[in-house]
Image (spheres, rainbow, N blue to C red):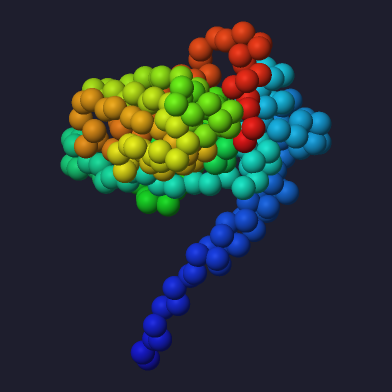
């Protein structure tokens, strides 16, 4: 018996299904850590408050609860081979990028013998590794006091790749390689200049270097007065 054409899921249906799965995961979640229990009881309602209390993310559901509109994208996917005495063993390696489009971003990588379990593991890893970045108007040509660029020049590295991000005036856009534009968008960066060195053809290293540069904005210690200015209007 002939089968009819397979129905293609629309983007709207995919998003609805994704939200339903997230809601089910959160409702069925039984926290195992003290921090998770506080989040489940709604005693902690934001990641800013979560990190301010000195907690570490040990359960991915914490991110699902505190950032319900989290975005995710698979930035790298490869089939890997391992040679053993029994012969060749194949597996899949996935790299997933997540972000809230405002100030949080994370990257996770994972391997599995099946495609979708590898992606799910990478997404879980990204949630456990989510980091906060600082934004501001760091360009002397702009001074608009809006959080649209990086606050100062930062450098990130991964293997042989080096990525330098510089503040740009409003309206400049993302002057960067295509592989890291999604990284900047997921972090809420709208205007930036970039300079890269090394083997940028390695997508994963390129993305990791860009994230390392963004996270460097939070590593620099600043005074309370300057820190309040960096937390400018979003």
Rendered image quadrant of residue 205:
top left
**Residue at x 45% of width, y 40% of height:** 171
Rendered image quadrant of residue 31:
top right
**Residue at x 81% of width, y 31% of height:** 43
**Residue at x 40% of width, y 38% of height:** 172
Residue 142's place in the image compared with 7, above or below, is above
Q: From this viewpoint, which residue is outermost toward the bottom?
A: 1
Asked whether residue 92 is in view, the answer is no
Asked whether residue 230 is in view, the answer is yes
For the C terminus, which image quadrant?
top right
Q: Looking at the image, which is closer to me, 1 or 168?
A: 168
Rendered image quadrant of residue 89:
top left
Residue 232's place in the image compared with 225, above or below, is below
Residue 161 lies left or right of residue 15; in this view the side is left
Count of numbered labels shown in the rendering? 0
Q: Position of residue 116 (x, y in %)?
A: 42, 52
Q: Looking at the image, which is closer to me, 98 or 171?
A: 171
Q: Position of residue 122 (x, y in %)?
A: 45, 40
Q: From this viewpoint, which residue is outermost toward the front?
A: 141
Q: Position of residue 128 (x, y in %)?
A: 54, 31
Q: Position of residue 42 (x, y in %)?
A: 80, 36
Residue 174 lies left or right of residue 221; in this view the side is left
**Residue at x 34% of width, y 37% of height:** 175
């Amino acid at each position: 018996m002939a089968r009819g054409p397979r129905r293609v899921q629309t983007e709207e249906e995919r998003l609805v299904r994704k939200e339903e799965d997230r809601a089910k995961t959160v409702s069925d979640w039984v926290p195992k850590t003290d921090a998770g229990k506080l989040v489940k009881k709604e005693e902690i309602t934001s990641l800013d408050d979560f990190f301010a209390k000195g907690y570490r993310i040990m359960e991915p559901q914490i991110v699902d609860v505190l950032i319900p509109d989290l975005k995710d994208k698979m930035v790298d996917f490869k089939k890997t081979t391992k040679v053993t005495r029994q012969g060749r063993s194949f597996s899949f390696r996935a790299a997933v990028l997540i972000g809230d489009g405002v100030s949080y971003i994370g990257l996770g990588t994972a391997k599995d013998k099946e495609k979708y379990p590898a992606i799910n593991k990478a997404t879980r890893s990204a949630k456990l590794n989510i980091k906060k970045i600082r934004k501001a108007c760091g360009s002397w040509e702009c001074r608009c006091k809006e959080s649209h660029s990086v606050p100062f020049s930062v450098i990130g590295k991964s293997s042989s790749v080096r990525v330098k991000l510089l503040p740009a005036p409003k309206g400049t856009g993302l002057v960067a390689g295509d592989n890291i534009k999604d990284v900047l968008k997921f972090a809420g960066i709208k205007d930036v200049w970039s300079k890269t060195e090394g083997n940028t053809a390695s997508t994963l290293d390129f993305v990791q270097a860009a994230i390392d540069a963004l996270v460097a904005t939070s590593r620099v210690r600043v005074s309370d007065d300057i820190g309040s200015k960096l937390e400018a209007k979003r």
